[in-house]
Image (cartoon, rainbow, N blue to C red):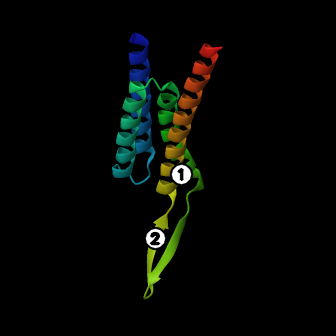
Amino acid sequence: MKKKLMWFVGSMVCLSMCFLLCVFLEPDRAIDWPLILFVFGLFAVVISSKFNGRMTMICTPLGYISGFVIGAIFNFDREVDVGGGNFVQFNNQISLWTNTYLLFILAGIVLDIAFKCLRKYRNKT
């Protein structure tokens, strides 16, 4: 129980530090989308701790900061014509960040399931 609590607290601290780092490094200091991703990550960590998903607890903060970095490196601005000569500016940093973050969380879930199946298989033989 103590080990489970330490994994939970460690993951929460790492995720919180990643959130603060991303908010301070964000060029326009927008906090709405980083906060939404942070809250989603909190739910992912709480649920994974309930099911002893250590890999998900590791991949969630790692995906948060990795998604931010990938979004910052590969983002680009473009203008989309919405008709009538009106153009809307679009930046893909948020979509890159979100998709990378979700892929990391999904990878953590898959790894947790694979490790649990492997442990069950090893205990059978």
Report helix, strand or loop for mark 2. Answer: strand
The extreme front residue here reads 124
Q: Residue 83 or 74: which is nearer the viewer?
A: 83
**Residue reaching furthest bottom?**
84
Determine whether 13 is above or below 4 in the image: below
Give the class, few, some or many, for how many residues have Cα within 10 Å of label 2's Cα (few <14, many ≥20). Answer: few
**Is residue 49 placed above or below 125 in the rendered structure?**
below
Q: Secondary structure at mark 1?
A: helix
The residue that appears at 39% across and 12% down in the rendered structure is 1
- Evaluate whether residue 109 shows in this view: yes
Residue type at numbered disc 2: Gln
**In 3D space, how far apart are the residues under numbered discs 1 and 2 (Cα atoms)?**
17 Å
Q: Position of residue 51 (x, y in %)?
A: 42, 26
Q: Amino acid at mark 1?
A: Gly
Comes first in the chain, label 1 or label 2: 1
Residue sitting at the far right: 125
In the rendered view, tell whether residue 120 sits above or below residue 107.
above
* Residue drawn at x 35%, y 45% as measured from the top left: 35
Q: Residue 80 location in percent, x, y?
A: 49, 75
- Is residue 13 visible in the rendered image? The answer is no
Residue 59, given in percent of the width and then of the height, sits at: 52, 33
Residue in front for this viewpoint, 21 or 53? 53
Q: In the image, residue 103 lies at what x, y percent? A: 54, 44
Image: 84 above or below 80: below
Residue indicated by mark 2: 89
Q: Which mark is residue 71?
A: 1
Which residue is at the front of the view, 95 or 121?
Answer: 121
At 38% from the left and 25% from the top, the residue drawn is 50
Give the position of the C terminus as an image quadrant: top right
Q: Residues within 10 Å of mark 1 (few under 14, many from 20)?
A: many
Q: Which mark is residue 17?
A: none
